[in-house]
């Protein structure tokens, strides 16, 4: 999404598809305040800068590991989360800049 006048409808559709699933939407809400929502799990890395370990997302959601991996890939393709590898684990955090860009695009074009 380059700007309000140049937005690619396909990009926005991917965002809406990614957020159209209740579980993915819930994960995005949890990732907004990772210390609050994942504080019960021992952090492998700093949740604010590196993100939340995919195993913790899986444990909190109660979903199968393969389902969570698929959901996180969908959110990543839409540009809503950024992955970071820490050892053998992938951590995810929200891409706040991208989310702000999406909000601006929606606010100015729809």
Image (tube, rainbow, N blue to C red):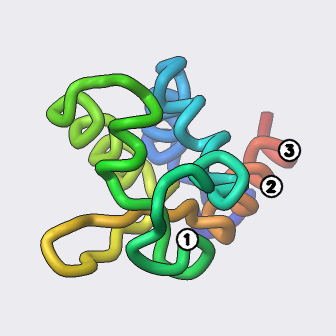
Q: Secondary structure at mark 1?
A: loop
Q: Residue at x 48, y 31 (%)?
A: 24
Judged left or right of residue 71, residue 20 is right
Question: Which quarter of the rendering shows the N terminus?
Answer: bottom right
Which callout, 2 or 1, points at the residue further toward the start of the chain? 1
Q: Secondary structure at mark 2?
A: helix
Tell me if residue 15 comes above or below residue 96 in the rendering.
Answer: above
Q: Residue at x 59, y 30 (%)?
A: 26
Circle 2 Cα neighbour tier, 10 Å, few/some/many (<14 / 14–19 / ≥20): few
Q: Which residue is mark 3?
A: 107
Q: Quadrant of residue 45?
A: bottom left
Pointers 2 and 3 in contact (C-beta within 8 Å): yes
Judged left or right of residue 73, residue 80 is right
Q: Residue at x 46, y 34 (%)?
A: 60
Of badges 2 and 1, nearer the viewer stands 1
Judged left or right of residue 98, residue 91 is left
Q: Which residue is mark 1?
A: 47
Can you give x and y, in whole percent of width and height, for residue 4 in the image?
A: 74, 58
Which callout, 3 or 1, points at the residue further toward the start of the chain? 1
Of badges 3 and 1, nearer the viewer stands 1
Q: Quadrant of residue 88?
A: bottom left
Can you give x and y, in whole percent of width and height, for residue 52 in the image?
A: 46, 61
Residue 5 visible in image: no
Residue furthest right in the image: 107
Can you give x and y, in whole percent of width and height, for residue 51 in the image?
A: 49, 68
Question: Which quarter of the rendering shows the C terminus?
Answer: top right
Q: Secondary structure at mark 3?
A: helix
Q: CA distance from mark 2 to mark 1?
A: 26 Å
Q: Which residue is mark 2?
A: 104
Judged left or right of residue 97, residue 60 is left
Q: Nearer the viewer, residue 95 or 53?
A: 53
């Amino acid at each position: 999404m380059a700007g309000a006048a140049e937005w690619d409808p396909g990009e926005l559709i991917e965002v809406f598809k990614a957020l159209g699933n209740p579980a993915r939407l819930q994960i995005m809400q949890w990732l907004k305040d990772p210390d609050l929502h994942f504080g019960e799990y021992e952090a492998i890395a700093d949740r604010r800068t590196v993100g939340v370990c995919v195993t913790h997302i899986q444990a909190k959601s109660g979903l199968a590991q393969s389902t969570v991996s698929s959901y996180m890939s969908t959110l990543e393709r839409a540009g809503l989360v950024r992955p970071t590898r820490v050892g053998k684990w992938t951590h995810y955090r929200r891409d706040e800049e991208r989310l702000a860009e999406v909000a601006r695009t929606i606010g100015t074009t729809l």
